[in-house]
Amino acid sequence: IPFLTIHQSKGLEFPVVIVPSLERRFRSDNEPLLDDELGFTFTPLARGEKAVVVPIAEFLKCRTASKMIAEEKRILYVACTRARDMLILSVVRQDNRSSHSWMNWLLNGLQIDESLSSTKIVRSVETQYLRVEGEQYNLVKLSHALEVHMLTPADL
């Protein structure tokens, strides 16, 4: 059984893929803040160890967070699309649904409310692709069901 990082799995496909620790929160505000275009900045401390608000530092915090979220979503996409037959996502349930974590993005994107009593959610999904037939391109639409099974430790 091969164990690969998400980056190592890029371009590959496997019958079963397990993605652990989806509850991990992402931090992008570690200082000093570095930016390719604007350089770097940090929040200086004034007398009494009180942080001084520096507009460029606040701007770079927002910009860095935005870039980090976009990159983490790309990484999650790569991880989830490596599975051919089954995708298993592992998460330690947390109360803060508003935080930036892979699991919260998935639940929000699939419009799944964690308080649902059912542990099986089925969503109808429609995908499209272009099929080449001779010199013609035809748009093909496929409908299929996406099943999400939410298991708790009691289910195991």
Image: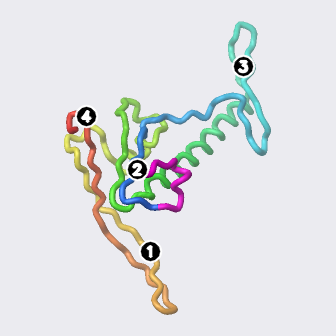
> Residue placed at 26% from the left, 41% from the top?
151
Q: Are marks 4 and 2 in contact (CB under 8 Å)?
A: no
Residue 92 or residue 110, whichever sits in front: 92
Three-letter residue code for mark 3 = Val
Q: Are marks 3 and 4 in contact (CB under 8 Å)?
A: no
Q: Please name which of the two marks, 3 or 4, marks the residue nearer to the observer.
A: 4
Q: Is residue 30 left or right of residue 34?
A: left
The region drawn magenta spans 1-12
Q: Please name which of the two marks, 4 or 2, marks the residue nearer to the observer.
A: 4
Query: Helix, strand or loop at disc 2?
Result: helix
Query: Helix, strand or loop at disc 4?
Result: helix
Q: Residue furthest bottom?
A: 134
**Disc marking residue 52:** 3
Circle 1 is placed at which residue position?
129
Give coordinates of residue 62: x percent, y percent.
63, 37
Mark 1 vs 4, N-terminal side? 1
Q: Please name which of the two marks, 2 or 1, marks the residue nearer to the observer.
A: 1
**Disc marking residue 153:** 4
Q: CA distance from mark 2 to mark 1?
A: 21 Å
> Residue placed at 56% from the left, 44% from the top?
69
> Residue placed at 24% from the left, 41% from the top?
116
Within 10 Å of disc 2 (Cα), the crowding (few <14, some 14-19, many 20+) is few
